[in-house]
Image: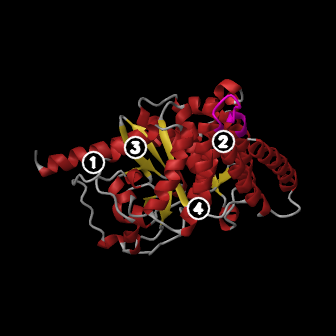
Amino acid sequence: MSRILFFGLFLLLHFTLSAQYRAIGRHAASAPDSLSRNLPALVEYLCRPAVNDTEKARSLYAWILHNLTYDEAAAGEQRRINRSIGDILQRRRGICYDYSTLYEAMCRQAGLECRAISGYSRPKLAEAVSPDAPGHAWNAVRLDGRWQLLDATWGDSGGKDELMARFGTDYFLTPPHLFVLNHLPAQPMWQLLPCPLDTSWFRLPAGRLSLDTTAACFAFRDSIGAFLLLPEAEQRLWEAEAAFRFFPTGANREQWAQAVIDFAVELDRGTEALQNADSLESLIRLQNRILSLCEQASALAALRGWQTEFYAGMLINQAVAFNQRANPAGSREHELDNLHQARDCLIRARKLLEALPEDNYYRAYAEKRCADYLEAVDFNIQRR
C-alpha cells in the first residue's frame, strides 16, 4: 500500500471517528436536566444512540464534560464536599475524585467494566513532581476486551494543554505511552505498558523519555485480571500496599495502615455469625486474623483513637473466647494455656486503653470490663 493511500485512509478514519464523536457529544449535551437526578435513566438516555461500547463510553464522558464544573474552592482546600454519587449529580461540581467516581458508576450502570485510578500527575511535561501521596484520579475502561485510559477532569480543561498540543491527542482513550507522560498511577499495572516506569522518571522532562512499547517485561493484563478477582475489600488493601511498594513515602505508609485497619473492620462483621459454642474455634481463628491485621497497622503508623478502641475491643473479645475454650472437661495443661492466652490479651488491651485520653468514654467502659475479666481469669488460673 502506498504512503499516500495509507495516509488517505488514516484521514478518512480520523474524520469519520470525529464525526461520530461530535454526534454523540450533541446527544449527550441535549440530555434533559431532570435525568441527572436518576442515574439509571440518565445512562439509558446517553447510551441510546450508541452502536458499540466505545460510543457508550464516549457519550458518558461527553455528558460529564458538558455538565460538571471543577470545584476550585474544594481543590484549594484539599477537601471533598460530595459524599455520594447523588451529591455529585445534584451539585454538578466536584474534584478529580468526583469525576472519576461518577464515570465509574455510569459505566457500571451501562454494563461497562471500569475502574477509578489514583496516582500522580503533572500538567507541564517538563515539570518535576514528587508528591508524598497520590493526588489525582482518572479512569481505566475495558472496551472490546482491551483496557484503555481516560481523564474526564483534564478533558474538561476548556482548551488544549501541553500534551494535547504537542501530540494531537485528548484525554479520551489516550494511548498509554502518551498518557503516562503526565499520569503515573499508584499501581504500575494501570500504566497499561509492557514495561512500567517507576516514580523516578517523573523528575525527567517528557522529551527525554524513551518508551519501548514492544518489550514484554510485565504481564499487566494478568495482574489486572488477578486483582479484579479479589473481593472488593481485599482490592482496597492490595491497592494501598502496592501504592506504598511503588513509592514508599510516609503518607503512603499511613494510607496502607488505614487500609489494613479498614480490612480488619470488614472481617469483624463475620464474627457475628460465629457467636455460639459450636463455632468457637472458627471465631478464635477469625479474631486471630483480625488481631494480626491490627498489629500490622500499628507497626506501620500510629493508630487513630477509634482504631485503638477497635484493637483493644478485639483483644477483649478474644480473651473471652479463650476463657470459654478453657473447658474444665479438658486437660489441665490445655485449660491453663487458654487462660494464660486470655490473660495476655487482656493485659495488651489494658495497655492500649491507657494510651487513650483519660476522658475518653470508651476507655472508662472498656477498662472496667477488662479489669473484671482479668480478675475472673486470674481466679480460674489460681483455682487450677
Which of the marked residues, 2 or 3, is nearer the chain's N terminus? Answer: 3
Which of the marked residues, 3 or 1, is nearer the chain's N terminus? Answer: 1
**At 34% across and 47% down in the image, what residue appears?**
220
- Label 2 secondary element: helix
Instruction: Give me the disc on residue 126.
Output: none
- Badge 2 crowding class, 10 Å Cα cut-off, few under 14, some 14 to 19, many 20 or more, is many
Our reading of the magenta stretch's main secondary structure is: loop
- Badge 1 crowding class, 10 Å Cα cut-off, few under 14, some 14 to 19, many 20 or more, is few
- Label 3 secondary element: helix
Q: Residue 190: tell me if it is visible.
A: yes
- Label 1 secondary element: helix
Residue bearing mark 1: 11
Tell which of 195 and 183 is nearer to you.
195
Q: CA distance from mark 2 to mark 3?
A: 43 Å
Rendering coords of residue 324 (x, y %): 72, 34
> Which residues lie in the magenta part?
323-332
**At 71% across and 26% down in the image, what residue appears?**
276
Residue bearing mark 3: 224
| Mark 2: amino acid | Asn
Q: CA distance from mark 4 to mark 2?
A: 26 Å
Instruction: Check if residue 251 falls in the magenta segment.
Output: no
| Relative horizontal placement of residue 252, taking residue 344 as reference (left or right) | left
- Badge 3 crowding class, 10 Å Cα cut-off, few under 14, some 14 to 19, many 20 or more, is some
Residue depth check, mark 1 versus mark 4: number of the one nearer the observer:
4
